Amino acid sequence: MEQNRPQWGTRAGFIMAAVGSAIGLGNIWRFPAVAYENGGGAFFLPYLFALLTAGIPLLIMEFTMGHKYRGSAPLTMTRMNKKAEWLGWWQLAISFVIATYYSVIIAWATSYSFFSFKLTWGDAPQDFLLGDYLQVVDAGQFGGFAGGVLLPLVIIWIVSLGILISGVKKGIEAATKVMLPVLVVLFLIVVVRALTLPGALEGLDAFFQPDWSKITDGKVWVAAYGQIFFSLSVGFAIMITYSSYLPKKADITNNAFITAFSNSSFELLAGFGVFAALGFMAQQQGVPVNEVVSSGVILAFAVFPQIINEFPVANGFFGFLFFASLTLAGLTSLISIVETFVAGLQEKFNISRTASVLFGGGAAAIISLLFATKGGLNFLDVTDYFINQFGVVFAGFVEVILVVWVFKELDSLKQHADSVSDIHLGAWWKFCLKFVTPIVLAYMMFDNIRQNIAAPYGDYPTSFLITYGWLVAAAALVVGVILMIVKPFDQRSKGGL
Ligand code: PHE
């Protein structure tokens, strides 16, 4: 089995796949608003700090774990220490939940790529989004399918699962090698166009205007770490899985730096593009930029269509480029997150890759239909919030504590990384993982709990928050533990080291 383990064809192929995973919807619709709200130009200091003291060290740690133990997250954890398998499954269950709704957002972006040509959303894009397209009903109700979402969703799943069935090298690597460069080119065209619109400079001014008073605010630092963790896809099992397909001699540390800096560069580029476009819109409407800043679903699917409506020329074309960029950025992330549980199931149950994709990916596809109902946006909003706040952050914390403090793996991981990498890890790496990362993650965890008890998320009924928020996050952990108990790994868990 070990000899048959799939491998990336080239170093560039691996880096592109890792960067493709990291660059996702979060880079485009999350980063610009987070930076703006947390000090603008002054945010770059905490952001860079978080990148160097937590993001990159964790990425190096996950790359090294995958490379050393050569398995999906559960197998990697088991090989590290038999008692840690459940953590891998927990992370896979979290990834599974994320895949079910992330795919739906990509489906919206696909629809909107086509809507762009005729500006189907009309003069009131927000009403179109919530009314005509998603047909949103009250929280807790399903209300049947939102018809327009189904077809693109089915297409997204067929494409993703088709790529995954084709394998690591012929599927994921080959597809990312096309999708990532195309994404960068399309997005660059959108950004250059945005920068040349009237009002763009005012937008950039608002974005970069440093508010140094924020630097002493703890919240800003937490926001910086939160953005870095999410954006780099660490704590999701993704990077462990991807690095497990590296050839034995592949460099680790340098690859981690390249991945992290490429991701941040794209994020910065998105900041330029989004704020230039917002500056343009503010000028058209004669309002200050701060009145038009938004993020997430509303930014992408309500505000952007409005901006595109006001483009002086070729609206449809630029609309298409923007939504096609969102689709591509999302697709490479979706593939990476589905690969985590495809790999895990395949190894655990000793089934073929195709069976694992159809079974695991198929299950995620079927559950994703829940989010394609008229109640889908409410379910999506709550599930996304809770699985990130109480899934990814918690699992990331437990991972660091187990690896660093309980199983005391840092020295052997450092040795392993140094034996194959150009750059050798200094004392800073161990220091950051021993102290900075766990402290920040622990703080984030307690702060999340405190905030949610003080003021429950959104305007949802409590029972809805409990079922689709708390219970989903808790279920990921329970499912993780159950999967560990189901059937032990066979002797492979001892081999291959
Ligand atoms: N880095 C991704 C993003 O910015 C995070 C992610 C990865 C989310 C994979 C879902 C799936 O969107």
Image (cartoon, rainbow, N blue to C red):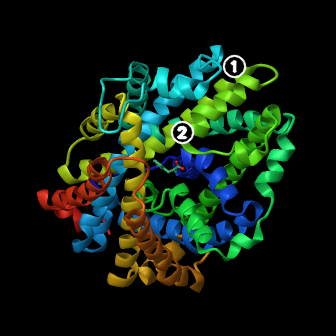
Residue position marked by numbered label 1 in the rendering: 316
Which residue is pictured at 52% across the width and 27% down the height?
129
Q: Position of residue 269 (x, y in %)?
A: 72, 48
* Mark whose residue sits in front, 1 or 2: 2
The correct choice, above or below, for 401 with respect to 316 in the image is below
Q: Amino acid at mark 1?
A: Gly
Nearer to me, 32 or 229: 32
Residue position marked by numbered label 2 in the rendering: 297
Q: Could you classify mark 2 by the number of other residues whose Cα lies within 10 Å: few (under 14), some (14-19), or many (20 or more)?
A: some
Nearer to me, 165 or 186: 186
Labels 1 and 2: the sequence-earlier one: 2
As drawn, the label of residue 100 is none
**Residue 487 visible here:** no
Q: Position of residue 101 (x, y in %)?
A: 39, 40
Q: Position of residue 328 (x, y in %)?
A: 56, 35
Quadrant in the picture for residue 253: bottom right
Q: Could you classify mark 1 by the number of other residues whose Cα lies within 10 Å: few (under 14), some (14-19), or many (20 or more)?
A: many
Which residue is pictured at 37% across the width and 34% down the height?
376
Element assignment for label 2: helix
Quadrant location, the C terminus: bottom left
Q: Are marks 1 and 2 in contact (CB under 8 Å)?
A: no
Which residue is pictured at 82% across the width and 39% down the height?
195
Element assignment for label 1: helix
Nearer to me, 31 or 373: 373
Nearer to me, 384 or 483: 384
Q: Amino acid at mark 2?
A: Val
Q: Position of residue 405 (x, y in %)?
A: 37, 84
